Amino acid sequence: MFTLSCPVNFYEYPCSEGSLFSILIPSWKNYNHLKLVLESIEKNSAYVHQVCVHLNEGDEQSKHLLDSLKISHSVSKENTGVCFGFNLAYSLAKCRYIVLMDDDMYVAPEWDKHLYEEIRKQTSIYWCLSGTMIERRKSGNSCVICPYNYGESPENFQEEKFLAEYSALPHRDWTGSMWYPLVVEKKLWDMIGGLSTEFSPGMYSDPDFMMKLWQAGVRDFKGISQSRVYHFISKSTVRVKKNNGRKQFLLKWGMSSSTFTKYYLRLGQPYERPCTTPDSTGFKRKLWIDKLKVWCMR
């Protein structure tokens, strides 16, 4: 069981009037990435937003940056992982819409406008939307636009080239909405209690978050193609001792995360309509196998 063994300090600044999104960003000794993502939000957003950051093992350089920009943030002396990191940043959030974002991203112009246009079509709080990542190498993830290499780090990021080309890269809206940037209503976040800290430091916390949304009644999971961000794929996970999230998810929900993302979320398929409860023969067979695995583990 992952527990916090250090105090967390909070530094709160006023939220700009009219802010649309509260953007939550956990960062772990990643100053150059954090600086770039904040610059891109300021430069490329169509609307004013509140940014809330949690600094894991907060370094003085990142702390000074956030103070100079008057960005609300929390700081822990140890790495709390992304689950606590997002939840701690959320404790500072003031806006109606909550956005989860990684610190190793660069948001493209009007990324937020395209999300908000979709939000305005909603008639309830039961939805979950994502922007679409552009990555430099193939990953097998059909939700991602790749391979388009605009740099491996902020130091060699080809910003001008990216800004000239990003909007013309071919893609389409997709279903599943599990990748960042991800936006939900604040009321919905409160309903499900944010990220589950038993998955700390964070492996499989994303599909768990999606499952909690499903259990709360969400069926419209949509990735918006024109809301685009460049993802540097900074591998913070190689620095942590990983939790066995695959097993945790299986034992918690009685099915594997792959069953959930394939049959419930239909992750990565072209978006056509909100999701429905699966009832195919393939799904029933896979669920039976999952339940057998759970029985063997207990």
Image (spheres, helix red, strand yellow):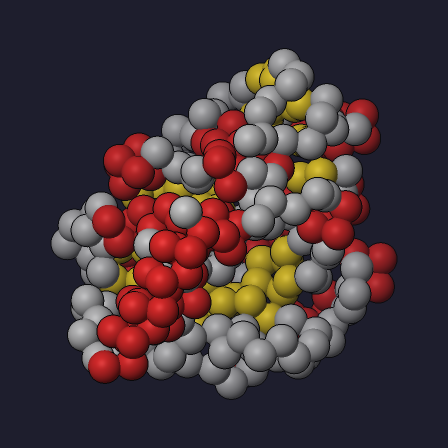
275 lies above or below 44 = below
| Extreme residue toward the left, this view | 123
The answer to whether one can see residue 100 in this image is: yes
Whether residue 291 sits left or right of residue 38 in the image: it is left
| Extreme residue toward the bottom, this view | 170
The quarter of the picture where residue 264 lies is bottom left
190 lies above or below 273 = above
Name the residue located 64 percent from the left edge and 62 percent from the top edge.
231
Q: Quadrant of the N terminus?
A: top right
The answer to whether one can see residue 35 in this image is: no
Name the residue located 19 percent from the left edge and 67 percent from the top edge.
277
Depth check: 175 or 200 in front?
A: 200
Q: Residue 291 location in percent, x, y?
A: 33, 60
Count of marks, rendered view: 0
Name the residue located 22 percent from the left edge and 60 percent from the top edge.
219
Q: Residue 239 location in percent, x, y?
A: 77, 46
The quarter of the picture where residue 229 lies is bottom right
Depth check: 56 or 291 in front?
A: 291
Name the residue located 19 percent from the left edge and 51 percent from the top edge.
217
Q: Residue 75 location in percent, x, y?
A: 65, 23
